[in-house]
Image (spheres, rainbow, N blue to C red):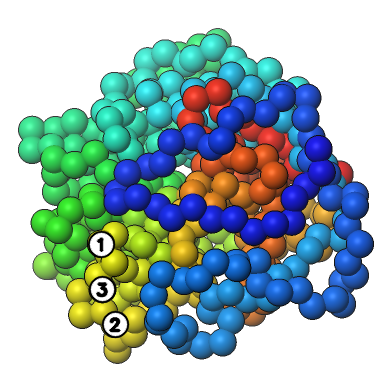
Amino acid sequence: MELSCSSSDDKKTPDVEEPDGSGDNNDDDASTNDDDTSTPDEPLDPVETQDPNSDYSPAFEGQTRIEGVQTQTEYTASVFATGLSSPWGMANLPDGRIIVTEKAGSMRLVSVSGVLGSPITGIPSVNSSGQGGLLDVAVDPNFEENRMLYWSFSQNGPDGTATAVAKGRLSDSEDQMEDATVIYTAIPEFNSTAHYGSRLAWDGQGNLFVSTGDRSSSVTRPEAQELDAALGKVLRITKNGDPASGNPFESNADALPEIYSYGHRNVQGLAIHPVTGDLWEAEFGPLGGDEVNLIEAGADYGWPTISYGLEYSGNPIGAGITQEAGMEQPVYYWDPAVSPSGIDFYSGNLIPEWTNNLFLGALSGQHIVRLVIEDNVVVGEERLLESEGRRFRDILDGADGALYALTDGDNAVIYRIGP
């Protein structure tokens, strides 16, 4: 099966995750780019060819619809693991295996040869309705000594549901989670099953970045701008769930000290740049306006005051403005939407032209986005695996120098992408 270079994008429906992609692929199928006839110096048109939903103008050249690029190194995308049920997040273990979460509340280990293990028991129950469930997973930097795992999930509470973070020790037998403990709950709770976020990323100092969503309601949407609520935020907490020292609002008595940045809609992508150590994120817009942001401590990213998207009715968001003093502009945005979920930087050298590029799993777009970034500016975009017809939920920079792409929904698979 040859890799398609055509453009495609599905518009999102209001606050509901779309059904799985257009059918399952044969597990033996593989996509390649060995029919590539372009040259590195050959300029390409932007990969997006559909009309935008709005008539908004970007704030600067290259903020959207940047010129296309095409990978020159020959690579293959093959199915690495099968049998997953609505997986959501994945992370590397020190020995090269991958741990994967499934939305209904399971975690699975995947061997270096792609064999899927049995569900790990001892994980507290989750609310898997709507967009909720067992979400992201992070492996403790000292896992080889302490065997600790951290995960985010949608938690039931007396006043509704909330994004929460828990930790536990993976047993020596690797079949159960020991001493599972909830360490953080993003307040306020609310009766919604949408826009939980939520990704996890280590800050390099042993603290955990946690992203949340605005909970997809006109009632809670304004909370993204409020510093006394954890909705629509990027947070930074310790391994015990306390606010990390040095957070930007720790001396503000009216703010939650765990807040790192605010004004976000629904952040499902977090990644640390392998060279600079900077935190990058990707978040869903509504009808268009999906964003990639470089996160600065204490910064306001504008939602719902500014947006390059529209309400699902087609009406403007709020006053219909895209810029406001004191609010950050996205480094890049899409209109129409591609629905960016998990993201990761490629730090390997098996495909040298990909090194330090940002990769995103697109759900409604049904492809993998490659963004070439130079000096914090996007200079090229490529779409990978469009021909597979899959919704991509997460991307992982693999321990073996390849990329791993996790699909969404029933009968989901992990692709290995590399030479």
The residue at which mark 2 appears reads as 321
Q: Identify the residue at horizontal 78%, vertical 47% (top origin).
A: 3
Q: Amino acid at mark 1?
A: Ser
Mark 3 is surrounded, within 10 Å at the Cα level, by few (under 14), some (14 to 19) or many (20 or more) other residues, namely: some
Would residue 322 be seen by someone viewing this image from the given angle?
Answer: yes
Frontmost residue, 379 versus 339:
339
Q: Residues within 10 Å of mark 1 (few under 14, many from 20)?
A: few
Q: Amino acid at mark 3?
A: Pro
Look at discs 2 and 3 and give the one toward the viewer. Answer: 3
**CA distance for labels 2 and 3:** 8 Å
Q: In the rendering, at what x and y percent does residue 406 appear?
A: 59, 37
Residue at 55% across / 23% down in the picture? 411
Left or right: 80, with 89 as reference point:
right
Quarter location, residue 227: bottom left
Image x and y of residue 298, in percent: 32, 72
Q: Which mark is residue 316?
A: 3
Query: Which residue is found at the position 18% from the left and 53% from the top?
Result: 217
Q: Mark 3 against mark 1, which lies toward the viewer?
A: 1
> Could you tell which of marks 2 and 3 lies nearer the N-terminus?
3
Query: Where residue 35 sits: x, y (%)?
Result: 90, 52
Q: Quadrant of the C terminus?
A: top right
Label 1 belongs to which residue? Answer: 313
Q: Quadrant of the N terminus?
A: top right
Could you tell me residue 254's position as x and y percent? 11, 67
Per the model, the C-alpha gap separating discs 2 and 1 is: 17 Å
Q: Amino acid at mark 2?
A: Ile
Q: Between 314 and 333, which is closer to the camera in this rendering? A: 314
Q: Is residue 108 left or right of residue 329?
A: right
Residue 111 shown left or right of residue 272 in the figure = right
